[in-house]
Amino acid sequence: MDWSILNQEQRQAAQCTKGAVLVTAGAGSGKTRLLTYRIFNIIEQGANPYNILAITFTNKAANEMKSRLSQLAPDISHMWVMTFHALCSRILRANIDRLNGYNRYFSIYDDNDQTRVIKNILSERNIDPDRYLKTIQYLMSESKNNGLTLEDFAIQYSDAPNFDLIYEVYEAYEKHMKANNALDFDDLLIKTKILLESNSDVLEHYAKRFEYISVDEFQDTNKIQYQLIKLLASYHKNIFIVGDEDQSIYGWRGANIDNIKDFIKDFDAKIFKLEQNYRSTKKILEAANRLISRNVNRLSKKLWTNNEDGVKIERYTAFYEGEESEYVASAIKSLVDYAGYNYSDIAVLVRLNALTQNFEEKFLSYNIPYEVFGGIKFYFRKEIKDILAYLTVIANPDDENAILRIINFPRRGIGSKTIEKLQSYCIEQNIKIRDALLDLENQNMSAELINKLKPFADILRDIIDFYNHNGLQKVAEYIVEHTGMWDLYSQDTEDNFNKRLNINQLLSSIASYVADNQTDDLNEYLTSISLQSDIDTYEEQSNKVTIATIHSVKGLEFNMVFITGLEEGIFPLLRTSGDNDIEEERRLMYVAMTRAKKRLYITNCRMRYLYGKREDRFQSRFLNEVFDDEPKPKIQHSDSSYGYNSHSLEKTQKTSVLYNNKSGYTPIIHKQPDKIKTIDIGDNLKTSGAKVIHKAYGKGVILSVSGEGNNTIAKIDFEKVGIKKLILAIAPLEVVDD
């Protein structure tokens, strides 16, 4: 084995193959290389890949590791390299029949499926679903991620407001899931824990099998994931953990940064530090170190690099969000047109999904190709979920949610009353809906009900039979053609065109899955896609700008990164409840900064339209922490001092709950003129259809006008640059005659 590819610290860690080891690996420090070469070293020493378990945070990371290992080791087909949820799903597929009421054909419900079930339970009790939905989902997930069963929940959460209702819904939810042979994402973890703890032979099998266990991104594990690791490592105790508390950014979904400290104590682990960064320039790294050093809850370390010094970090303060997106778009155009970069070199990162729209609109007007991650997932789109529901009905006979989704889709004359009669009949006869439909002619139903249900029953029998004879890839194509779904989207509208593209993409991905995995197993396919995140589809080869939430690009890197929306209340995100974790928000900013290899741009706005209203914004505290060794930047936008609302300082007191709570931070307020001047905008500039000329954009036509006073915004279609939104108080516009 050629050890020269690793630095001294990496080499020492990779050669430590026995016992418990913790590696604190800073951003860009080569941890994937370390993990890969350590596993290769273990194989070279004579270990069987069958006895190795490597747990990653994302499917993308798992695929990357398998790709690297396959180039080093002759055969890794029996090695398990996967995420926690994929690991649990595989264990459950083989053993869940040990848990009463489940079988190996279980469905995996995503967040939308879970929401639908809980809403139905609340509606059946004549309770407004929107009032309690989020609270119930949060408490259920928190409970499961802490390893608590329903019975434990009844004890530990008895003091929660509206506990009786929440427990009743939770109990009904669990009964519904078992009746439908379905698990949600949190169930995959807790059911595996229950399975291992209650079946000593199953635990012994896996604990003895996995002689060597490694876990990546350990800082983002929750309590139950750590409990699972301790169970699986209970026999050999050879466990290799890689994590960085400075990159722990999932506390909001149960990740426990203290798992790192507990691991050191529980396993008496050896500790190695990777502090050399191979990714970023010195200037980017120095700023990132300066920022994260303000956190208290962290192990002492400071990243360094031999990379070039690099260009300075660019900071831009826009007047409003349209100017911010204009700056980003024009900078990207310049980098691509004049500096030789590709669009795929660039990422625009946001704290909130709500901030992506302005960039999408601006990129369209600039003809900048882009792809959005962190928003609506591909497999959440309606047309995709409809096809997957047909496949689920084939795979899981008990999943009545899937049947009810497609029983009248595309429309075939089966209304809600017919469905209610079917459900009532099945309850009375103690028979599954699918079984009743497949044997419809022999059911003791009215002739009218049978005739209503027959078209769907025929389709159901047809697709099940077709799958049994032709497999996954062909049945997916068959469903699209023979259920009438393709005809449903045949009209040439933009929406239908996009739906047809998505359906084609799904069919293509199924074909690729079958070819890549050499399997037509429907359950394995449904499991694989249920555990995918949208960033798993990210491809560097596609020459597009990435627009993404910071959470969704964890583990990725780009030559150039724009971090946008650096304003108090947005980044850091501050909640009116006062339940804010500023250290985690700072870690999220650190993760965003360390995605950048060569250039980093940071932007904020003085005012922003968000959630239906335009408000003045305070600059983020993180700007001072990143740039505190550098001179204050000039405001780089057009003359906008007129633009501040006259009530901005008065409003500070009203919104102070966001800024003066537990964080103890006093925001910097942009200096205001002694007297805010209201600009008189002529009526001719407020008229739709008016022809105008702009100093930079040339001639255009006003399409629409919204807002009032200094916040009046016109949507203008310019002949040269297309549609833009401009604030009339500051835009250099003149009305022109025909």
Image: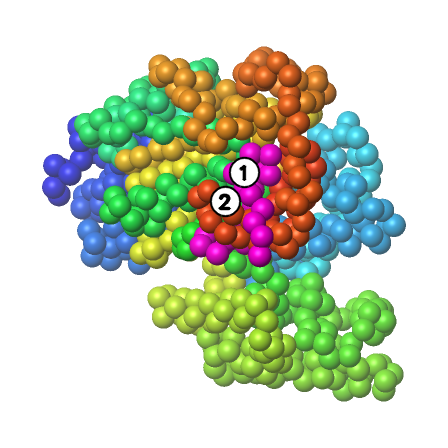
Q: Name the residue under label 1.
A: 731
Picture coordinates of residue 626 (x, y %)?
Answer: 40, 21
Picture coordinates of residue 420 (x, y %)?
Answer: 84, 69
Q: What residue type is labelled 1?
A: Ala
The quadrant of the picture occupied by the C terminus is bottom right
Residue in view at x 78 percent, y 76 percent: 414
| Magenta-drawn segment | 717-738
Q: Which amino acid does label 2 sit on?
A: His
Horizontally, is 18 left or right of 400 in the view? left
The quadrant of the picture occupied by the N terminus is top left
Q: Name the residue under label 2.
A: 694
Label 1 residue SS:
loop
Residue in view at x 31 percent, y 56 percent: 541
Picture coordinates of residue 224 (x, y %)?
Answer: 54, 37
Q: Nearer the viewer, residue 440 or 96?
A: 440
Q: Quadrant of residue 11?
A: top left
Label 2–label 1 contact, CB within 8 A: yes
In this view, 273 is above or below 721: above
Instruction: Report whether residue 99 is seen.
Output: no
